[in-house]
Image (cartoon, rainbow, N blue to C red):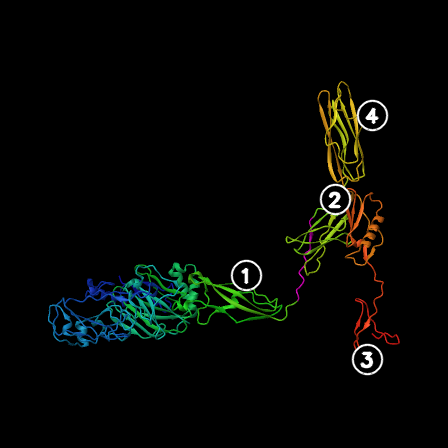
């Protein structure tokens, strides 16, 4: 069966509506090809052998398959009766074959070789369609075998085409490049056009210092194929010609003669920015035997025909059309390397390419043609990416659709050019004091001229960060530096770089702005603390000064907050019943607003009445259960026991004495009883009475009382007495007029005594033995006989005395001789703080 192109494809080779298909063989191209097939008969085997038994094959490797892999063609096997002449190809061009015919017959086992002089022999790796040349005659001494060789004479081109098969052999060039082998029948090359050779580097060969074929570090390999031996379908390679600053490109279409499997189109892109416009185009078509059947030394959009037997159609796509077609192409190929990123890769490839080129052709086992496409691009800027892609999209009519891709993304011409180098955008950045700098680190760094731009695509992005984590500021005048750390995507294997940025802040540094004041919070529970100088805990800014205010707005205590932001205020005045507040003032700052108020309450006197405990046979009465008292308060508690048949014992098992000043007394009919003995007592009664001593310290104590009857029944009951501080009972008054003092921060002993007397005179109701002590600032501490204290702040007690002493006589220091009638400045020495006035001789004030 023969595959034919059905319908008019036009330029839209990517359209899903355009398909290769099987048509009825009646007239036209298909009929002609069918006739040809019948004429050839069983001797024609597509893809593998020619009608005369010669084997034709070609292999080559793209840059993605490793450096220096040569493109080769298998030698054509000639009949044994034909002599073979080995010739060396020219260095840069391939021309029609010129060989030498032997003058005598040669036995089938003999080999005739012709070698060029070493000084002029050059090896060239020509594409499959290139033709070997030789200008050296064959001499008799070079003929080997059982037949004598006579003197050779040059053969004509026609003779060579009739009887000689030319074979190129490897030879070492002056630049140490190794050529590939390329054997082509002389009869096929006699009419071949001149084709510029494409030099390639063989595996294991010594590489020229002026050329290289490679992929740079970090490049993404795009190789993918759904066919084995992808290199038999399509190849792309380039060489860096350093001497001429040019890239030599080669694209091979169907080098492995894959017949129907190669029907469709080959595509490739040419980079831009890194290289210039392509020149020196050569598009050479060879038949299955390697014979050149068409040559075009140009590339032109919509040129040629893809129909069977034609020379293939060229197409070129640019701009948005290139992007769209690459996107669809990448999606159709389903390359795992770019799965999910097809659109992004297509957009990047299009952005970095001059154009997308396609060669569309029908192919089959009968024709099995191959195209060799070569062109040059001048190197423009090595720091720009050298992305390229090539591949084949088969029609899938026979053997399934061919999907092949090769090439690289994020590639550069060489490793040296692929290295990133970050530098500062500017030498220095300036701003005025109080101004600002850009906080984004990426805006301060760029790539050094002649180095690649920072990568930022679907594979990863370059990141930028301030090394110390802080953006630049313009708060203080001066010059300083900061460091930006530039980190590249991991696949480039390039260490992060640090770039130093210089900042200059111009102008005067403003005076420090007072720090914002934090409103403090009083955290103490002040229930029952009224009339005492209880400590107060306040949360505030660390290092700030905390002031405590009573409900009169008077400062009654200060403290500094510690590193944990806690201040403990020891009040200079007893806490009043009611609300208090606090403020905080940071160092160098202003005082905050007042805190939320906290209520201070007085301790409530507790009274819990007593009762009777026991049963019908044994009972115990205590008239009080819990009493709260102050020193000096009276206490009167009755304890009574009853028993049936009688009371055996009435006693205090523990802690009988609860406070100083109180004592037990027995009733006249009997009180506490150790044992009744033979006596019978139905009831016993005792009393706990007296006034709590003024020196009794605050606290609670509990006594237990017990009774036991004759039958051993025991009943108990408790009494608790809580004594409060005397300070909580009284609220001292500061008295009337304040005492005038010369220095409120350091009052004298006489002034202290006056303050103490004033407070004592104002508080005659306080218990005897109460003392009054004033400190150096006039704060008075009142100590009661029970050692509890009250305090009165100096703000209520002292005031600075008015200065009633006349200042010392001032002295005029300025010499006023001859100054009459003028208004000179006059210097006068006078008492600090005094007001100086100048008078004339008549007593008139003149200044």
Rendered location of residue 247, percent (x, y): 35, 72
Rendered location of residue 39, percent (x, y): 20, 65
- Tell me: 368 left or right of 485: left
* Circles 2, 1 touching at the beta carbon (< 8 Å): no
Q: Is residue 394 visible?
A: no
* Circles 4, 3 touching at the beta carbon (< 8 Å): no
Residue at the spot of label 1 = 469
Image point 12% across, 70% down: which residue? Answer: 106
Residue at the spot of label 2 = 528
Q: Secondary structure at mark 3?
A: loop
In the image, which is nearer the foreground, mark 3 or mark 2? 3
Mark drawn on residue 668: 4
Report, in whole angstroms, how far the alpha carbon at label 3 lies from the one at label 1: 71 Å
In the image, which is nearer the foreground, mark 4 or mark 3? 3
Report, in whole angstroms, how far the alpha carbon at label 4 lies from the one at label 2: 42 Å
Looking at the figure, which quarter contains the N terminus? bottom left
Residue at the farthest top position: 678
The stretch in magenta equals: 511-523
Residue at the spot of label 3 = 817
In the image, which is nearer the foreground, mark 3 or mark 1? 3
Report, in whole angstroms, how far the alpha carbon at label 1 lies from the one at label 4: 91 Å
Mark 2 or mark 1: which comes first in sequence? 1
Is residue 518 on the magenta stretch?
Answer: yes
570, 367: nearer the viewer: 570
475, 588: nearer the viewer: 588
Report, in whole angstroms, how far the alpha carbon at label 4 lies from the one at label 3: 109 Å
Q: Residues within 10 Å of mark 1 (few under 14, many from 20)?
A: few
Image point 78% across, 47% down: which residue? Answer: 790
In the image, which is nearer the foreground, mark 4 or mark 2? 4
Rendered location of residue 575, percent (x, y): 76, 48
In the image, which is nearer the foreground, mark 1 or mark 4? 4
Mark 4 or mark 3: which comes first in sequence? 4
């Amino acid at each position: 069966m023969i595959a034919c192109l059905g319908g008019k494809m036009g330029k839209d080779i990517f359209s899903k509506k355009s398909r290769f298909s099987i048509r009825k063989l009646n007239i036209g191209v298909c009929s002609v090809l069918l006739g040809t097939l019948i004429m050839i008969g069983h001797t024609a085997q597509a893809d593998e052998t020619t009608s005369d038994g010669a084997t034709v094959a070609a292999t080559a490797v793209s840059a993605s398959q490793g450096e220096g892999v040569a493109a080769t063609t298998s030698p054509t096997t000639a009949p044994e009766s034909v002599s073979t002449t080995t010739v060396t190809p020219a260095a840069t061009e391939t021309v029609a074959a010129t060989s030498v015919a032997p003058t005598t017959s040669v036995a089938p086992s003999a080999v005739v070789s012709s070698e060029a002089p070493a000084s002029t022999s050059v090896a060239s790796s020509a594409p499959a369609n290139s033709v070997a040349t030789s200008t050296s005659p064959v001499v008799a001494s070079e003929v080997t075998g059982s037949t004598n060789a006579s003197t050779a004479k040059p053969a004509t081109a026609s003779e060579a085409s009739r009887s000689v098969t030319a074979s190129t052999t490897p030879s070492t060039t002056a630049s140490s490049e190794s050529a590939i082998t390329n054997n082509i029948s002389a009869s096929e090359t006699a009419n071949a056009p001149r084709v510029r050779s494409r030099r390639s580097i063989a595996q294991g060969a010594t590489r020229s210092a002026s050329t290289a074929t490679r992929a740079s570090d970090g490049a993404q390999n795009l190789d993918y194929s759904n066919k084995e031996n992808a290199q038999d379908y399509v190849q792309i390679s380039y060489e860096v010609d350093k001497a001429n600053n040019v890239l030599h490109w080669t694209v091979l279409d169907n080098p492995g003669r894959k017949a129907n499997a190669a029907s469709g189109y080959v595509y490739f892109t040419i980079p831009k920015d890194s290289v210039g416009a392509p020149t020196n185009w050569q598009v050479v078509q060879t038949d299955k035997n390697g014979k050149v059947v068409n040559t075009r030394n140009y590339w032109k959009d919509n040129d040629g025909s893809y129909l069977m037997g034609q020379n293939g159609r060229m197409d070129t796509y640019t701009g948005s059309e290139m992007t769209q077609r690459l996107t669809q192409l990448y999606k159709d190929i389903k390359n795992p390397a770019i799965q999910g990123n097809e659109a992004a890769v297509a957009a990047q490839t299009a952005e970095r390419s001059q154009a997308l080129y396609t060669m569309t052709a029908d192919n089959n086992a009968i024709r099995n043609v191959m195209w060799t496409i070569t062109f040059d691009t001048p190197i423009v800027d090595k720091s720009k990416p050298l992305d390229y892609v090539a591949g084949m999209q088969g029609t899938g009519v026979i053997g399934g659709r061919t999907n092949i891709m090769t090439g690289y993304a994020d590639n550069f011409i060489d490793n040296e050019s692929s290295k990133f180098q970050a530098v500062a955008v500017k030498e220095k950045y300036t701003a005025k004091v109080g101004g600002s700098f850009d906080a984004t680190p990426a805006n301060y760094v760029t790539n050094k001229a002649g180095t690649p731009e920072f990568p930022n695509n679907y594979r990863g992005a370059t990141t930028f960060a301030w090394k110390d984590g802080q953006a630049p500021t313009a708060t203080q005048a001066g010059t300083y530096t900061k460091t930006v750390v530039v980190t590249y995507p991991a696949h480039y294997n390039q260490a992060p770089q640090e770039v130093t940025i210089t900042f200059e802040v111009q102008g005067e540094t403003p005076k420090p702005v007072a720090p914002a004041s934090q409103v403090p919070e009083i955290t103490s529970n002040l229930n029952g603390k009224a009339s005492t100088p209880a400590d107060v805990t306040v949360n505030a800014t660390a290092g700030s000064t905390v002031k405590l205010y009573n409900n009169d707005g008077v400062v009654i205590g200060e403290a500094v907050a510690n590193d944990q932001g806690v201040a403990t205020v020891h009040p200079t005045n007893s806490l009043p019943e009611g609300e208090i507040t606090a403020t905080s003032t940071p160092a160098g700052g202003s005082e905050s607003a007042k805190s939320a108020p906290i209520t201070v309450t007085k301790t409530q006197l507790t009274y819990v009445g007593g009762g009777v405990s026991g049963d019908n046979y044994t009972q115990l009465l205590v008239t009080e259960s819990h009493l709260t008292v102050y020193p000096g308060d009276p206490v009167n508690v009755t304890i009574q026991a009853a028993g049936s048949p009688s009371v055996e014992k009435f006693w205090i098992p523990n802690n009988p004495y609860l406070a100083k000043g109180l004592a037990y007394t027995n009733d006249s009919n009997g009180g506490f009883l150790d044992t009744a003995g033979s006596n019978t007592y139905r009831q016993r009664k005792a009393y706990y009475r007296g006034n709590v001593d003024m020196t009794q310290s605050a606290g609670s104590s509990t006594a237990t009382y017990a009774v036991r009857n004759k039958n051993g029944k025991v009943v108990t009951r408790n009494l608790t007495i809580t004594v409060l501080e005397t300070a909580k009972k009284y609220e001292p008054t500061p008295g009337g007029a304040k005492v005038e003092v010369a220095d409120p921060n350091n009052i004298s002993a006489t002034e202290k005594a006056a303050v103490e007397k004033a407070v004592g005179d104002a508080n005659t109701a306080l218990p005897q033995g109460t003392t009054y002590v004033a400190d150096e600032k006039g704060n008075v501490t009142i100590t009661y006989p029970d050692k509890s204290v009250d305090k009165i702040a100096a703000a209520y007690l002292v005031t600075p005395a008015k200065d009633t002493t006349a200042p010392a006589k001032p002295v005029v220091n300025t010499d006023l001789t001859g100054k009459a009638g003028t208004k000179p400045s006059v210097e006068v020495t006078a008492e600090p703080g005094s007001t100086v006035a100048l008078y004339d001789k008549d007593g008139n004030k003149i200044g």
